[in-house]
Amino acid sequence: MKKTFLLSMLSLLLLQQLQAQTYLTGSIKDNKGEALAGASVEVKGQTLYAIADTTGKFQLEAPAKVPFTITISFVGYTSKDVKINSLQQPDLDIVLFESQELSEVVVTARRRSESIQEIPLSITAVSGDLVAETGSFNVNRLKEIVPNVQLYSSNPRNTTLNIRGLGSTFGLTNDGIDAGVGFYVDGVYYSRPAATTLDFIDVERIEVLRGPQGTLFGKNTTAGAFNITSKKPSFTTGANVELSYGNFQFVQAKASITGPLTKKVAARLSFSGTHRDGLIKNISTGNATNTLSNIGLKGQVLYNPTNKVAITFAADYTRQRPDGYAQVIAGVVPTLRAPYRQFNQIIADLGYTLPSENPFDRVIDHDTPWRSEQDMAGGSVNVDVKLGPGTLTSTTAYRYWRWGPSNDRDFTGLPVLSLSQAPSKHHQWSQEVRYAGELAKKLSGVFGVFVFGQDLRTSPYHTEESGAAQWRFSQSSTSSLWQTPGLLDGYGIRTKSKLNTVSAAIFAQVDWEFVKNLHLLPGIRFNYDFKGVDYNREAYGGLETDDPALLAIKRGVYSSQVFDTTAKRANVSGQLTIAYKPLKQIHIYTTYSNSFKSFGVNLGGLPTDKGRIMTELAVIKPELVHHVEVGVKTNPVRNLSLNLTFFNTTTKNYQAQVQTAEVGVNRGYLSNAEKVRVLGVEFEGSYSFKEYFSIYGNVSYTDGKYLKFTNAPVPLEETGGEKAFKDISGARLPGISKWSGAVGGEVAYPAKFFGQSNGKYFVAVDGTFRTEFSSSSSPSKYLNIDGYGLMNLRAGYKSPKGFSFYVWSRNLLNKNYFEQLLPAAGNAGHYAAVLGDQRTFGLTLRYNY
């Protein structure tokens, strides 16, 4: 009897609950009567929301209490608020009008959607449309749009991504240090710098955060972060196809398709492929080199079991097979070595002449093929659960990278370094869990934990091998023994190494409006890092001999080296921001943060001192960063934004990559500069007038110096002097231009093409400039790159739906410029250049469904 009574009561309560469940229904259209599929309906101040279907209809779970307000929004249309006073009402008929205002840029840098002008951070957001239209299909091209971003790449592995001149070491990459600029795609951290060379696939938005990050993101970074958001699966069927054709046989194809699989499951499949013939002619083979050959795939499945839970499964694969990243000899430096050890004398003795002394003839005669094979893949599961007034997010990910290179590091047609290869394999996994949302009426926050692990190893080993001409480049005395036939021919080193890393962190940041329009934002991070290195380098080949004098010569060129080390360290860092809005149009903030970059481990070999391996350099100190920033964000008038930022960053124990004359350590090694400082000012602005005209621009002044670096390597021209190290305190940091900037704009005229509505004819121009900068870790009067400016142009017809086409040209004025200068292995006096692309042009065709 009691059980029957209890069951009856429970059934009654359940029935009452079901009866109490009320839904708002309605439809959303534009002023022309067309359904706005995908428009969102949200209850203000709560987590309840709905998405309009293909006919524009929606069904929204209503709050229990009235009144409340719902917000209806759709990209390109003015949002509308509707107050609901009663739950007993007919279907809502909502009409949205096309927006004539400057489109509000919404970003997720603080782990929630908000206007970019409301965020007290130095941040730039670039839409996926602008990325595609400007041909910025990777970070190297995107840097021309975003202020104070520098990227230098002599191949995908040897890539330096910096913000405000800080982030990674300048020069050849040493795998034993962390990146100072975080690279995230859909919440997943990519630890290998090679990821920045991949083609973007189906990008929705790219956010670039400048300054230390660690209280909002999983991985701690000292210079900033790239936060890339892909287009998500949609329950509205859609597709797009894009084809581009250009000179140098450039062909690029992109495609994506999305739609529902069931009522609760949607999917998206995206593809990108790029091909281009080479831009440099190898006269020894008759073929052009520095080609592009990239293929990328990405698949996503979205599962919404309820309106409060979203689970996204994602997987991607990218394959690159370029014949390239060859560098050309750009010049020869007179060093302090004896006359017979100067580059010009060496090649004269060998009867060799350079194919050209003008690097912009774009010809080489290299005898070792250039190869940069790269495979990168991964998968992730992202779970978003609306919990109370916020969202709980879990991101689980695995990534894989395979690198298969071949280089000619002597940059000549002589058999000096016949092999220079560093094939590697990398595995990483990561897990992040965070909660972001409102904690009280005037208090919000982000709280998270992050765990990351990686395994990087040679595959199967790295190789440096001498050719028949190596003896003359390595010759360090006038002894005739150097000319012993076959002494160094085929002599080299094979290196096997492993790096294991584990990093874990707890981080938090809150936003407290303790006085109206005055916010306090403290953040804190606790971090733990472990790194273990196993390094084994073995010399092999060359002339087999027992002669002590000949063996001494061989060991002076290459020698075996073995060491292993482990290190671990914990660290606490944080930041404090004060933000104030004296007026609706003005947002002022100031930030102080102290951050760090984990200690480094040398994974490219160690230099020697009178035959002794300098194992004290196996582990280098972590960077400690103190950063101050003041920013002002304004919207003076409608459709106009003007932002100004002042920053000053001081780094102790700056991790520097230094070059050595030892051929066996031709990748350089890691060391600490005692103190560096970077300060500057950034200005950004944008303006639009309806759909007819838009313009954006930015300019930066940046000053970077070694405040103290007493044990730096000597510059190339001082190689062979009495000292191998030099005090360069007060000298400028490499890779930083005092002035840099970009400007772009578009003029458009609304028109119909083949009966399509909402289209427009347009002409757009983008330009970028930078002043001269140093391309050497120790300033050299020879390794400075002159300033340059570039202009890009595009014109055609575009429409959000249907057919679009436009012609384009990059480097329209065909400017010759260097991107990077770097010494050849062994510092014989010659140096090579990474050349900027010459003028390219083409046609893009696109169809959106």
Image (spheres, grey):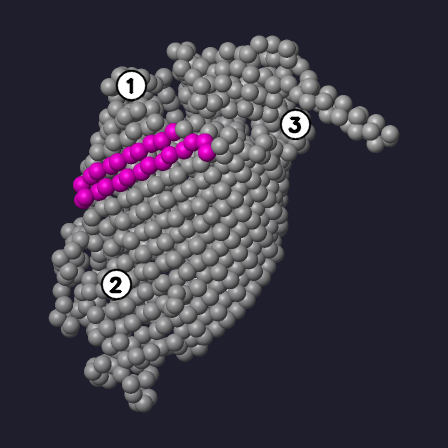
Disc 2 marks which amino acid? Asp
Place of residue 100 in the rendered image (x, y in percent of width and height, measured from the top left): 40, 16
Cα distance between the residues tagged 1 and 3: 47 Å
Residue in view at x 32 percent, y 65 percent = 421
Could you tell me which secondary element the residue under label 2 belongs to? loop
The structure residue drawn at horizontal position 46% and vertical position 66%, both measured from the top left corner, is: 498
Label 3 belongs to which residue? 442
Residue 819 shows in this picture: yes
The circle on residue 232 is: none
Q: Is residue 768 visible?
A: no
How far separated are the C-alphas under marks 2 and 3? 60 Å
Give left or right: position of 311 versus 78. right
Q: Which residues are magenta?
A: 238-261
Which is more N-terminal, label 3 or label 2? Answer: 2
**Badge 1 is on which residue?**
756
Residue at figure coordinates x 56%, y 40% from the top left = 383
Mark 1 or 3: the one toward you: 1
Specify whether residue 254 is painted magenta. yes
> Regarding mark 3 in the picture, which secondary structure is present there?
loop
Asked if 320 appears above or below 568 in the picture, the reply is above
Q: Residues within 10 Å of mark 1 (few under 14, many from 20)?
A: some
Q: Earlier in the sequence, mark 1 or mark 3?
A: 3
Q: Secondary structure at mark 1?
A: strand
Is residue 39 depicted above or below 154 in this figure?
Answer: above
Which quarter of the image is occupied by the C terminus? Answer: top left
Asked if residue 523 lies left or right of residue 847, the reply is right
Q: Amino acid at mark 3?
A: Lys
The span from disc 2 to disc 1 (Cα, nearest Å) is 53 Å
Q: Above or below — where is 198 with respect to 776?
A: above
Residue matched to label 2: 408
In x, y percent, where is residue 503? 56, 55
